[in-house]
Amino acid sequence: MLKIAPHWLIIVSGLSYQLDLTPIPKAKLEYSVPNKLVYSGHFYGFSWPIPTWSLVTYEHFKKKFFNSQTFIRGKGYPYFLGEFGNNQRDVPWKFLIEYLKETDIDWTYWALDGFKCTPDKD
């Protein structure tokens, strides 16, 4: 059992750049202080290898995001979207905002360089 100070909050992130929390149920995490464990993930439109977002429905997005990250809420753990951002209001942005409204998930927005840079750009 990990001993933590009573005022500490432990944030556990997923794998693959914090996009995948599916291994979490297999890990038996126990803490000496109850209610101090939060699971966190990230989302960016470029995070998912989708050829074109115009072919993705909101229902598909919702299912994939739930199955990879927010399912953890159904297991009795808090979930926090620790980072997301974008430099335009495109399809992934709109889908994520709709999902956050529907689920009342807490989040932080990454305002700096919220897009994927290519090696030839500074």
Image (tube, helix red, strand yellow):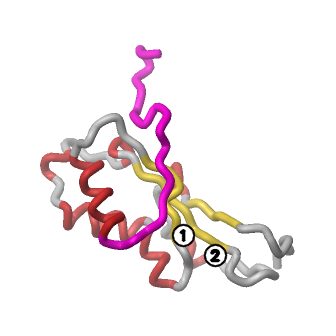
Q: Which mark is residue 27?
A: 2
Q: Which mark is residue 116?
A: none
- Quickly name the residue at label 1: 23
**Is residue 16 visible to the viewer in this orientation of the structure?**
no
Q: Is residue 56 left or right of residue 9?
A: left
The residue tagged with tag 2: helix, strand or loop? Answer: loop
**Is residue 103 visible to the viewer in this orientation of the structure?**
yes
Q: Residue at x 66, y 73 (%)?
A: 37
On the image, the x and y values in percent for residue 58 come to 19, 62
Q: Residue at x 23, y 43 (%)?
A: 90
How dense is the environment of label 2, judged by Cα within 10 Å: few (below 14), some, or many (20 and up)? few
On the image, the x and y values in percent for residue 1 come to 82, 79
The residue tagged with tag 1: helix, strand or loop? Answer: loop
Q: Magenta residues: mostly which secondary structure?
A: loop
74 shown above or below 11: below
- Residue range in magenta is 102-122
What type is the residue that disc 2 sits on?
Ala
Q: Indicate whether residue 112 is drawn in magenta.
A: yes
What type is the residue that disc 1 sits on?
Pro
Q: Is residue 73 left or right of residue 65?
A: right
Query: Along the line of sight, which residue is nearer the eye, 88 or 118?
Result: 88
How dense is the environment of label 1, judged by Cα within 10 Å: few (below 14), some, or many (20 and up)? few
On the image, the x and y values in percent for residue 97 come to 31, 57
Query: Along the line of sight, which residue is nearer the eye, 37 or 103?
Result: 103
- State which quadrant residue 66 falls in: bottom left
39 shown above or below 96: below
Mark 1–mark 2 CB contact (< 8 Å) = yes
Q: Residue at x 84, y 71 (%)?
A: 4
